[in-house]
Amino acid sequence: MFCYQCEQTTRLPTGDGCASAKGLCGKDATTADLQDLLVHAVKGIAQQARRARALGVPDNDAGAFMLHALFTTLTNVNFNPTRFVTLLHEAAAVRDRVAARCEAALVADSDTAQTAPAPTGPAVDWTPAADLTGLLAQAATVPVNADLARVGADVVGLRALILYGMKGVAAYANHAAVLGYTRDAVFAGVEETMAYLASDPTDMAELLDRALSVGRLNLQVMEMLDAANTGRFGTPHPTAVRVTPVAGKAILVSGHDLGDLEALLKQTAGTDINVYTHGEMLPAHGYPALKAYPHLVGNFGGAWQDQQTDFATFPGPILMTSNCIIEPGPRYRQRIFTTGPVGWPGVRHLADHAFAPLIAAAHALPGFKADDLKTAGPEQTVTVGFGGDAVLGVAGAVVEAVKAGDIRHFFLIGGCDGAAAGRNYYSDFATGAPDDTVVLTLGCAKYRFNRHEFGSIGGIPRLLDIGQCNDSYSAIRIASALAEAFGCGVNDLPLSLVVSWFEQKAAAVLLTLLALGIRNIRLGPTLPAFLTPTLLAVLVERFGIQPITTAPDDIAAALTCA
Ligand code: SF4
Ligand code: SF3
């Protein structure tokens, strides 16, 4: 195996990347290799699907399959090799179905053959081997660095940046698609980009342009996802969320998929089961259609890397709806379930919102006992729901506070969390930001500081939780609206972006920010291993990207430049 797609990747003096029997996330070599082969298969589907679109017979079902397949290969999503074997055979069938569609279209109109020649190359010609040994032999030829000796680390790194950005795009687009929101332009963009990668491109300038076009595609996807979430569940409003449990039977829902949460709330309505959010599901409490369920009682635990402790102590079953799952510990292995793209060997998978086994497990488990809670102390809350509309609703007051000098600066401190020691930088930064500054946050990084008492400035809370990483579009809307109010560009605002990355959704958002021309982003806790010194120099020169240093120094530098 060779994988260097996430921040936690193995770092060695001899070269970065997880390359032994198991990655640091727990992904074994078999799963990693099958994931590489699935990416290869998706490139082949994309080649045929792009042709089908050119022939006037687009196949958005193939597009939906590509989104789901790429999502399964994200960090901390699916560790089950059996699922990948199934997906590989499905991928070949999807591609062949699209190819047959193309042939049928050509029979109907032979003049179009010139405009869309049949694709060629190893991805579109691939036939899945009959058994696991054969699949692994095929996978050995297609790792992300397969071409290293021929094209060099810079080209491999830029291709990886595009691929990882596309994994993030696919994940976000899949979140929207399962809520019924898709767009032809998004499917076309996925086809175009994955087919481009199938051509083994080597032109550095073209690769960099493509990476930025992935960022622009992701902006469309983030806007679509925002429309999906607000269209289905209403506009988030500031909402105090209980973070101390209540007595009763309990189910914990983690990950990002709001549709899964809604389905579970419907299926448990009128029972004696309470539902709690975990990790990136916390912002669900701000949506009117979700908080209308009285048995959505609160949030439990912290960010994803705390799950082995959180889940072990939770007295009910757990549902993982998306990233980030890590190896289930023995104390909860029998009561954790996966759904959607998520998988772990031996963990029960519930497809199509068939949550009856999860609900039965909740009935069978003790839940929170009133006696146990007597020692838990007073009720505590955190406030969520400062999405784009909520913040823009007070934009006038915010602008006035800036003009009056009451708000000196904004910091957007957001993105992923992780287990690395250096990540306390982000909590140090947020809690060390001066009292006349406002902290906007999103993603799971906020768990490091969202219980800190930030206070307010003239009634405006100093900590504004915009939501999940899935809500990055709201952050972009807020920044754009502030820039408009001040009659300047986003780069001229008293705003600093302090980004914490871990997985490939963050790679997609970073590309979006760069595509929008946003400069001087501070990125950490370590820089992506796939970015060579040459690529970093380009990003520094064109976009002013800066690695984080220390929180006090970076706060001081941001305020000096403001
Ligand atoms: Fe290593 Fe990250 Fe890949 Fe896991 S996802 S194998 S930790 S680089
Ligand atoms: Fe977190 Fe996994 Fe990225 Fe959605 S849950 S931000 S790391």
Image: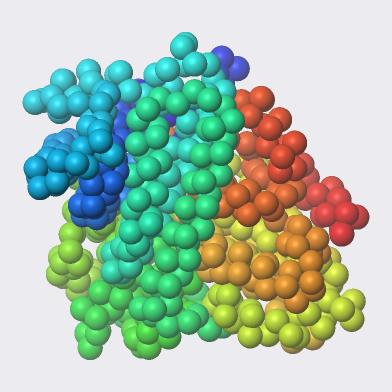
Q: Give x and y (percent) for residue 325.
A: 37, 50
Ligand 1 - quadrant of the structure image: top left
Color scheme of the displayed model: rainbow
Q: Would you say 152 lies left or right of 99 here?
A: right
Residue 142 seen in this snapshot? yes
Question: Which percent across, then down, holds residue 388?
Answer: 58, 75
Q: Quadrant of the C terminus?
A: bottom right
Task: Note whether residue 132 is visible.
Answer: no
Instruction: Say above or below: 10 vs 7.
Output: above
Q: Position of residue 213 (x, y in %)?
A: 52, 46
Q: Residue at left 53%, top 25%?
A: 203
The residue positioned farthest toward the front in the image shown? 111
Residue 324 lies, with reference to residue 272, above or below; the image says: above
Q: Nearer the viewer, residue 545 or 310?
A: 545
Position of residue 457 in the picture relative to residue 282 (left or right): right
- Residue at 19% of width from left, 41% of height from top? 111
Q: Quadrant of residue 366?
A: bottom left
Question: How far across and how far down the image is residue 228, in percent?
Answer: 38, 71
The residue under the point 54% across, 20% down is 153
